[in-house]
Amino acid sequence: MNLQHHVVAPLIATAIAAASLAGTFGVAAYMQSVGATQRQNSRAPLDPKLVAGGRKLFLMNCAHCHADDATGDEGPDLHGLHKTDERLRLLIKNGIKGEMPRFNEKLADPDLDALVAYLNSLR
């Protein structure tokens, strides 16, 4: 074997390994996004009592910015949200700096469950 073979062969092997690894990460990222979409879309049927309680909480706490029908006013329209339940809970609890107040001290976990159920009913 000549010197060129000793240099080129490892470079080719490294390039092939890198391409294979990149492909693996690409497939993994795709599968995670598909899984997230399926988790988001495979929600249990909504409990009407929970939704009604969430609407009442929404009217008391959120409607002044998002309008009584959640179509938006000072705050955005909340119909058709594409966020997981956990993300919605975190947004409500922690707010958005300079845009939305935090409700972590005002609303308990059952209240958050009801609000999230109401928001899910708007899809």
Image: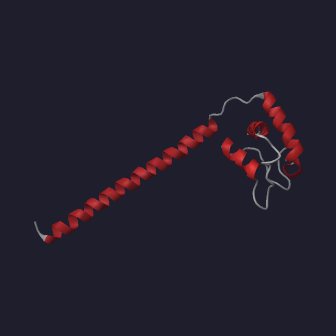
| Residue situated furthest left in the rendering | 1
How is the protein colored in the picture?
secondary structure
Give the image location of residue 83, x and y in percent. 67, 46
Q: Nearer the viewer, residue 97 or 108?
A: 108
Give the image location of residue 50, x and y in percent. 79, 31
Say above or below: 34 vs 16.
above
Number of marks present in the image shown:
0
| Residue situated furthest front in the rendering | 105
Q: Residue at x 86, y 52 (%)?
A: 65
Where on the picture, by quarter, is residue 69? top right
Q: Is residue 103 visible?
A: yes
Where on the picture, by quarter, is residue 114? top right
Q: Residue at x 77, y 47 (%)?
A: 78
| Residue situated furthest bottom in the rendering | 3
Q: Is residue 83 visible?
A: no
Point out the image quarter for the C terminus: top right
14 relative position to 83: left or right: left
Give the image location of residue 109, x and y in percent. 75, 39
Q: Residue at x 17, y 67 (%)?
A: 6
Point out the image quarter for the N terminus: bottom left
24 relative position to 35: left or right: left
40 relative position to 114: left or right: left
Give the image location of residue 87, x and y in percent. 67, 47
Where on the picture, by quarter, is residue 39? top right
Q: Nearer the viewer, residue 34 or 116?
A: 116
Q: Residue at x 49, y 44 (%)?
A: 31
